[in-house]
Image (cartoon, rainbow, N blue to C red):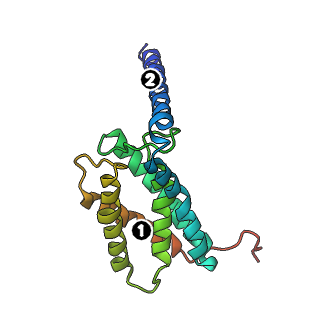
Amino acid sequence: MAFEKGLAQSERAYNQLTEVSSLFAKIVREEFFTTWQWWFGLALFIVPWIVWFRLRKKDSTGRLLLGGLLTIILSLTIDLAALSLGLWSYPMVIIPLAPFLFLPYHFSLAPVAVMLALQIKPKMNPLLKGIIFSAIAAFGGMNFFNAIDFYNPKDWSTLYDFIIFLTFYFAAYSVTKIENYSKFDKEKD
């Protein structure tokens, strides 16, 4: 009996979630779409990838993309956990398909910033570079997004954002330094 009751409650929750998503779509359509903030958010989705494509080290593209993919996975995982706990929110909705997430951050800003940081001054001490990157991203970037109402940290400390960005940087750094990549088409002797 408990399982059937749980299924019924789950279905009601999904119906409520669908209503909330429809409300966010209406908000985007009627309130945000004509604002500079919405267009700026859309540009944040596209422009970083154009910049990265032009500035990337072409011989390191695969490794950098692997680091970027790991950053996307980590940022989405951390964000979903934090949002479900109510630690922060994103008042500005760019794409109503995932109204609780700020998708330009996850799929563009965070991975591209990490990939660019990885390839700039590759011989620099990685700890120092990670600290500089994380400080700029957390204390500069996140406070900027808070100021323009794209991000509401609630009682979340920027120091925690710093630690998260440091984690992104070193996770991506680690996978880009793996030495045993080999081609699939190589035959073993």
For the residue pair 3 and 11, the one nearer the viewer reads as 11
Left or right, residue 98 beside residue 85:
right
Q: Which mark is residue 101?
A: none
In percent of the image, x 25 and y 61: which residue is there? Answer: 159
Residue that mark 1 sits on? 169
Q: Name the residue type under label 2.
A: Gln
For the residue pair 56 and 180, the one nearer the viewer reads as 56
Question: SS class of the residue under badge 1?
Answer: helix
Q: CA distance from mark 1 to mark 2?
A: 37 Å
Name the spot of residue 22 as percent of width and height, x first: 50, 28
For the residue pair 110 and 25, the one nearer the viewer reads as 25
For the residue pair 37 and 146, the one nearer the viewer reads as 37
Name the spot of residue 68 as percent of width and height, x first: 52, 64
In percent of the image, x 52 and y 56: which residue is there? Answer: 43
> Neighbour class for label 1 at 10 Å: few (<14), some, many (≥20)?
many
**Quadrant where the image shows the N terminus:** top left
Name the spot of residue 71 as percent of width and height, x first: 47, 60
Q: Name the residue type under label 1.
A: Tyr
Which quadrant would residue 3 be assigned to in this image?
A: top left
> Measured along the vertical axis of the image, is residue 114 above or below residue 179?
above
Name the spot of residue 152 as percent of width and height, x first: 30, 47
**Quadrant where the image shows the C terminus:** bottom right
Left or right, residue 144 beside residue 56:
left
Q: Which mark is residue 16?
A: 2
